[in-house]
Image (cartoon, helix red, strand yellow):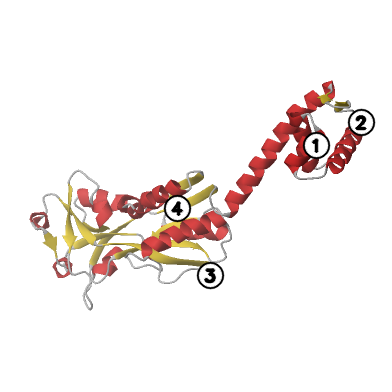
């Protein structure tokens, strides 16, 4: 039994006339009659009572009509979903993001813009460190990452910068620097600084390294697992922290943030993905991010 047999049967059942049904289907009446007979033979039951000038559904035909309509509807829906999936209009995208990219707006903005055009696409967002994102992309548990821009991408991955943020200095509220509006990198030459772990900075420009003038050394007095631990350390008076603009907006008791001016670099955030990505919905999302990148 093929789907066309069901479509032929439904047309005759709705028209109750073979010639009108054949015209509706754009096939010859004898062909339609032969197809209905073949369907009845497959089922081992008569679907229509045929009279000289009329056709009527049998009890079996009435029951079969309900199932035939349901099957056709499901088949049409499956075809629609398949076509939309091929165009990248439906599906699920797993997105990993570092906190500064989320608070900076690039991740919420990109998802919002994409779902305005493709409302049936669902997103799974995960706060993940940059290295964890790279692993997830390689292993296939992640589709797109928004991470720190690496010095070079791991084998099989590619990316481009989608956001740039200036650096700010996190300072204890009672520190002399808190009275200033802006901080020059040279002012930090003898300042105690709190940084993240070396493992998390491997292969990336660290915040402190990015604002260090050529030939000058910075004093890192403590290394902590993540950026929130940097804020805790600053609030505790252990040292000063270099953070991105988006994270500087987060209110932390006992901490104030001041913009670092004349820094050598900004904090670059990259959209990262698999080079051989074939899913249309993911490629469409990457295209949206690439369009944003052109505006930088």
**For the residue carrying disc 3, how many other residues have a C-alpha within 10 Å: few (<14), some (14-19), or many (20+)?**
few
Q: Quadrant of the N terminus?
A: top right
Provide the residue designation for mark 2.
Answer: 44
**Residue occupying the point 69% across, 41% down:** 75
199 horizontally vs 71: left or right? left
Q: What is the distance, in whole Å, between disc 1 and disc 3 at their CAs?
A: 64 Å
Provide the residue designation for mark 3.
Answer: 155
Q: Are marks 3 and 4 in contact (CB under 8 Å)?
A: no
State which mark lies toward you, 1 or 2: 1
Residue 253 can be seen in this image: yes
| Of the image marks 3 and 4, the number of the one nearer the N terminus | 4
**For the residue carrying disc 1, how many other residues have a C-alpha within 10 Å: few (<14), some (14-19), or many (20+)?**
some
Secondary element type, mark 3: loop
Residue 96, numbered circle: 4
Up/down of 50 relative to 184, above or below: above
Q: Are marks 4 and 1 in contact (CB under 8 Å)?
A: no
**Residue occupying the point 38% across, 65% down:** 161
Residue 214 lies, in percent from the top left, at: 23, 77
**Residue occupying the point 48% across, 46% down:** 124
């Amino acid at each position: 039994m093929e789907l066309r047999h069901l479509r032929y049967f439904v047309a005759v059942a709705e028209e109750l006339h073979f010639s009108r049904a054949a015209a509706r289907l754009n096939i010859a009446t004898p062909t339609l009659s032969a197809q209905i007979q073949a369907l009845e033979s497959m089922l081992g039951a008569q679907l229509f009572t045929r009279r000289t000038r009329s056709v009527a559904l049998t009890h079996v035909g009435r029951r079969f009509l309900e199932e035939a309509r349901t099957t056709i509807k499901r088949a049409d829906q499956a075809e629609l979903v398949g076509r939309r999936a091929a165009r990248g209009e439906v599906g699920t995208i797993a997105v990993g993001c570092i906190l500064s990219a989320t608070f900076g707006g690039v991740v919420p903005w990109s998802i919002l813009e994409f779902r305005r055009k493709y409302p049936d696409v669902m997103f799974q967002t995960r706060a993940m460190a940059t290295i964890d994102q790279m692993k997830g992309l390689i292993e296939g548990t992640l589709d797109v990452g928004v991470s720190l821009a690496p010095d070079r991408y791991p084998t099989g991955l590619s990316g481009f910068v989608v956001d740039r943020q200036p650096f700010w200095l996190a300072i204890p509220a009672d520190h002399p620097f808190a009275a200033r509006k802006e901080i020059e990198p040279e002012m930090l030459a003898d300042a105690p600084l709190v940084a993240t772990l070396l493992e998390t900075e491997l292969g990336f420009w660290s915040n402190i390294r990015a604002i260090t003038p050529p030939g000058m050394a910075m004093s890192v007095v403590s290394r902590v697992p993540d950026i929130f631990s940097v804020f805790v350390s600053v609030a505790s008076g252990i040292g000063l922290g270099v953070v991105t603009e988006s994270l500087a907006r987060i209110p932390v008791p006992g901490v104030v943030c001041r913009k670092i001016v004349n820094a050598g670099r900004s904090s670059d955030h990259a959209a990262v993905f698999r080079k051989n990505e074939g899913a249309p919905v993911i490629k469409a999302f990457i295209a949206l991010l690439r369009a944003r990148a052109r505006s930088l």
